[in-house]
């Protein structure tokens, strides 16, 4: 493919944003794709309930490893090339799942779908290079929102497809979306000169993968294994030990997979810590609200909704993330990314407080979800903007990948904590009590406000339009 001149890249900017956002939504949709099928997976795949749980877990683990690695590859090889590869991997993984009738190939396909999540941080980093300054903020906001939009839309969409057709149709749908993404990236997204030749740290990638998998497996399986069990403690401690060794190795490398010195800069470090808290806040409501909607009415506080109905109640929240992209862009321009992230975290926290006080009807929970999702949409747009404003252009992809990883860590921890809290207080029928759900909403609110407090400590970061324009011109020259 020939490299696009600056004028062509600018003319294509709106189509480029649409193509990249569609790809981001296609990749993030895989996170919730199998949730409507989860109860039937043991029967459909001829396996145990415990083994079937890995169909969800393996995607999260693969995504966590892929996001920083894909970001670094984008910096070295060129972001457009990595986007094409990620879309192709998503298509292959979806086809493998669509053809699977047993556990092993399904896990392979789901792992490939997780690897394709690297599309999102690379796409966010590319936005700064292929959009004019007037569009950059909105483009980054929209691309960041696809992390939540895809997941929110995926729930009712996959529930409807699974109920109306053969369950494999869910994965054929994902394969078609991935194929369309590949075509969009190939023929719409300009190929700019953004490669910075360097060596790929394969050993660093293996070390990061082993360490992350150890920690995240321990956290995600803690409820099933027990927080104090040898397997849980061994996985977490072993993963942390590997990450410490990996960090020491990275500091000695001339061309590390992740530049930890850059990541240790106060704006980057604190933004990434805040990302854990905001990611926690996002995932908590995505777990708790659907469960509460589907609880039997006989509990006295359950809504008795089907999976499809619960997904439809949640869908407006996902769309709200996308609708708030222009609002977030205006905030980024007028008050800067730091205050924008604080506003987003505050709105997210308010959403949880609304849920705490209003959990008596499905529409009340939908309102709380919309408020929380608006906060996520605002906050998710601000974080990559803060990161991009604090790192060199040559490290943009890797830096955004690490930020996306931190959000993923937050969502994984949220899943484990919410599951533990709900299981810790149950009725005689074995269902979580109202108090357990109230505790989850309070924990989500605290996490969001902690994220706001951490963000307040971040030194002021402001991306000047002129600087962005020069970066675009330099990348396209």
Image (cartoon, helix red, strand yellow):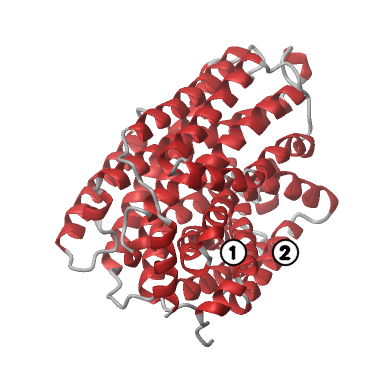
Task: From the image, tell me which residue sits under label 2.
Answer: 172
Task: From the image, tell me which residue sits under label 1.
Answer: 20
Q: Secondary structure at mark 2?
A: helix
Point 50% across, 73% down: residue: 80
Query: Who comes first in sequence, dot 1 or dot 2?
Result: 1
Choose top left, top right, bottom left or bottom right for residue 71.
bottom left
Point 53% across, 48% down: residue: 54
Percent x, y of residue 254: 18, 68
Label pair 1/2, CB-CB below 8 angstroms:
no
Q: In the displayed structure, does residue 192 sit left or right of residue 95?
A: left
Q: Secondary structure at mark 1?
A: helix
Percent x, y of residue 28: 59, 53
Say if 400 sits above or below 11 in the image.
above
Say if 131 sits above or below 410 in the image.
below
Say if 40 sits above or below 134 in the image.
above
The quadrant in which the C terminus is found is: bottom left
Badge 1 local density, few (<14 within 10 Å), some, or many (20+)? many
Point 54% across, 73% down: residue: 84
Which of the labelled discs sits on residue 164, or is there none? none
């Amino acid at each position: 493919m020939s490299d696009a001149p600056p004028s062509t890249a600018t003319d294509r900017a709106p189509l480029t944003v649409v193509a990249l956002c569609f790809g981001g939504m296609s990749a993030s949709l895989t996170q919730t794709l199998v949730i409507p099928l989860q109860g039937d997976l043991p029967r459909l795949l001829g396996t145990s309930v415990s083994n079937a749980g890995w169909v969800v877990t393996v995607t999260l683990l693969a995504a966590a490893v892929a996001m920083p690695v894909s970001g670094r590859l984008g910096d070295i090889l060129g972001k457009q090339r990595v986007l094409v590869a990620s879309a192709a991997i998503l298509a292959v993984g979806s086809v493998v799942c669509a053809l699977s009738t047993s556990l092993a190939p399904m896990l392979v396909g789901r792992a490939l779908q997780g690897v394709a999540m690297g599309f999102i941080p690379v796409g966010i980093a590319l936005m700064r290079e292929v959009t004019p300054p007037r569009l950059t903020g909105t483009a980054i906001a929209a691309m960041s929102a696809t992390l939540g939009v895809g997941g929110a839309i995926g729930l009712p969409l996959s529930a409807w497809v699974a109920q109306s057709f053969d369950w494999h149709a869910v994965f054929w749908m994902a394969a078609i979306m991935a194929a369309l993404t590949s075509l969009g990236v190939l023929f719409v997204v300009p190929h700019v000169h953004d490669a910075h030749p360097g060596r790929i740290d394969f050993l660093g990638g293996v070390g990061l993968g082993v360490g992350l998998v150890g920690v995240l497996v321990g956290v995600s399986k803690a409820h099933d294994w027990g927080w104090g069990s040898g397997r849980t403690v061994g996985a977490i401690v072993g993963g942390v030990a590997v990450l410490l060794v990996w960090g020491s190795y990275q500091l000695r490398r001339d061309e590390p997979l992740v530049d930890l010195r850059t990541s240790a800069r106060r704006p980057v470090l604190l933004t990434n810590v805040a990302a854990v808290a905001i990611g926690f806040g996002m995932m908590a409501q995505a777990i708790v609200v659907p469960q509460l909607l589907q609880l039997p009415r006989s509990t006295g506080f359950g809504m008795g909704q089907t999976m499809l109905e619960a997904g439809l109640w949640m869908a407006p929240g996902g769309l709200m993330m996308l609708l708030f992209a222009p609002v977030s862009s205006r905030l980024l321009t007028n008050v800067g990314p730091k205050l924008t992230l604080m506003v987003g975290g505050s709105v997210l926290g308010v959403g949880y407080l609304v849920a705490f006080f209003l959990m008596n009807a499905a529409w009340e929970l939908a309102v709380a979800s919309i408020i929380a999702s608006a906060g996520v949409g605002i906050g998710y747009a601000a974080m990559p903007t803060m990161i991009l404003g604090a790192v060199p252009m040559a490290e943009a992809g890797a830096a955004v990948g690490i930020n996306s990883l931190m959000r993923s860590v937050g969502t994984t921890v949220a899943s484990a904590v919410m599951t533990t809290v709900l299981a810790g207080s149950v009725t005689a029928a074995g269902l979580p009590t109202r108090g357990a759900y109230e505790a989850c909403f309070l924990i989500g609110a605290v996490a969001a406000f902690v994220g706001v407090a951490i963000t307040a400590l971040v030194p002021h970061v402001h991306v000047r339009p002129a600087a962005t324009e020069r970066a675009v011109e330099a990348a396209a020259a």
